[in-house]
């Protein structure tokens, strides 16, 4: 079978392409390189020994998508292509709605017309907001997202539910917790542009001496050590979940399927625990200072991922330390390229 992977040269996309190729799917990637680089394609080929088809275009260009689908028989899609910076989305919300939703609707219009099913959507635990109870399972009520980025994920989910219901399609909405780490080959990983906003790239660049000090945003949260808690999931585990979710859709005999899965480890770690785990795993030091809380941050979020284990036979089993070790190796690789 041939799977269209949009954003297939991005962080989670590239790891998922590798897992798809390892599971004998053919892959067609569309990626406009707005948040990725071309060498990732070479590295996917090096890691897998296979060459996915690659198209460098923006999915808002419907006519280019039409041409692609005329040229390839596609059996499903994993849609990673989206802008994803929470803070930026507050500054340029229209660009987020336009980019994330127009591209999604273009693909769905084509799938409707061409009778293609099996669509996997990158969603986020951000759709839950600050949940009232932990852990968060799939029945936890959604609260209106705080950021425009989060709203594009909530809207995307709604669009896909309507798409599946009206046109009898199979869709899977995957709600990621906090993805971290890099491929064990150290040839694929996260490529932060400019000053990182997310914790792990900032910790990594601080350990590497690129940043002077990590700012820990608040130590007065109602948590055991006062810092905020998240569920950090290893990106290769996350990539494997996509293959499992895709196989489930393909094998499901129902005409209409709307799957929703939380993808996390089920374990929460505080910011300070992450910093110390990074130091232990890599025998480096991460200087930090405690600062005021960051606006919009929630106190705690971790998953109940039992549904994915039961229905997909999937579980995130890589430890935080192991994931952080791969992050550091990826950093060494990036430095060796400069
Ligand atoms: N943090 C710091 N210092 C930093 C960066 C982060 O202390 O320099 C803290 C944050 O305050 C937070 C934790 O580290 O408590 C994790 O922050 P991230 O920015 O890495 O991740 P978030 O949980 O804020 O956001 C992530 C993704 C979003 C996604 C969201 C879902 O970046 O895309 O999870 O909750 F929507």
Image (tube, rainbow, N blue to C red):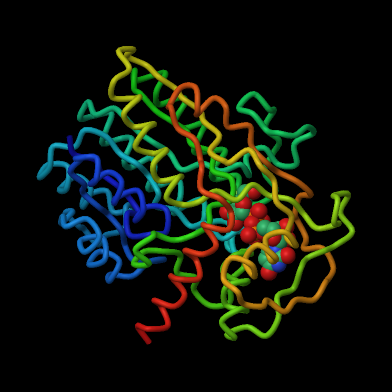
Q: Is residue 276 left or right of residue 175?
A: right
Say which of 65 and 200 sits in front: 200
Where residue 312 appears, as percent x and y from the top left, is 43, 27
Q: Is residue 225 left or right of residue 270?
A: right
- Look at 64% across and 67% down and name the residue there: 280
Residue 90 appears in the rendering: no
Where residue 176 appears, as percent x and y from the top left, is 54, 43
Q: How many marks?
A: 0
322, above or below 283, in the image = above
The quarter of the displayed image where residue 272 is located: bottom right
Question: The C terminus lies in which quarter of the figure?
Answer: bottom left
114, above or below 232, in the image = above
The quarter of the displayed image where residue 2 is located: top left
Residue most extreme to the left: 71
Where residue 293 appears, as percent x and y from the top left, is 82, 63
Residue 171 appears in the rendering: yes
Where residue 202 appears, as percent x and y from the top left, is 61, 72
Say which of 24 and 149 sits in front: 24
- Look at 37% across and 48% down and name the residue there: 103
Say which of 65 and 56 sits in front: 56
- Look at 68% across and 27% down and name the residue there: 140
For ligand 1, the image quadrant comes to bottom right
- Look at 65% across and 62% down and name the residue there: 277
Q: Is residue 155 left or right of residue 62?
A: right
């Amino acid at each position: 079978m041939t799977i269209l992977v949009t954003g297939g040269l991005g962080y989670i996309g590239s790891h998922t392409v590798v897992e798809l190729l390892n599971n004998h799917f053919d892959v067609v990637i569309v990626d406009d390189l707005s948040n990725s680089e071309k060498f990732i394609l070479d590295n996917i080929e090096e890691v897998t020994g296979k060459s996915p088809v690659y198209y460098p275009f923006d999915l808002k260009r419907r006519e280019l998508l039409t041409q692609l689908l005329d040229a390839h028989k596609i059996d499903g899609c994993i849609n990673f292509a989206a802008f994803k910076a929470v803070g930026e989305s507050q500054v340029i919300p229209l660009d987020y709605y336009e980019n994330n939703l127009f591209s999604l609707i273009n693909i769905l219009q084509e799938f409707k017309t061409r009778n293609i099913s099996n669509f996997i959507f990158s969603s986020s635990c951000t759709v839950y907001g600050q949940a009232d109870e932990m852990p968060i399972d799939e029945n936890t009520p959604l609260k209106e997202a705080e950021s425009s980025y989060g709203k594009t994920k909530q809207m995307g989910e709604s669009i896909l539910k309507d798409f599946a219901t009206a046109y009898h399609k199979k869709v899977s909405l995957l709600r990621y917790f906090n993805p971290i780490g890099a491929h064990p080959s150290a040839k694929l990983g996260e490529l932060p542009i400019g000053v990182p906003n997310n914790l792990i790239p900032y910790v990594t660049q601080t350990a590497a001496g690129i940043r002077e000090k990590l700012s820990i945003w608040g130590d007065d949260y109602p948590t055991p050590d006062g810092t905020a808690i998240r569920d950090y999931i290893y990106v290769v585990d996350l990539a494997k979940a996509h293959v499992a979710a895709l196989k489930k859709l393909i094998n499901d005999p129902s005409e209409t399927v709307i799957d929703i899965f939380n993808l996390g480890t089920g374990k929460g770690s505080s910011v300070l625990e992450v910093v110390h785990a990074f130091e232990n795993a890599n025998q480096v030091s991460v200087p930090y200072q405690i600062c005021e809380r960051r606006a919009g941050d929630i106190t705690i979020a971790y998953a109940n991922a039992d549904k994915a284990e039961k229905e997909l036979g999937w579980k995130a089993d890589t430890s935080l330390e192991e994931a952080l070790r791969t992050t550091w190796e990826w950093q060494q690789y990036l430095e060796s390229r400069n």
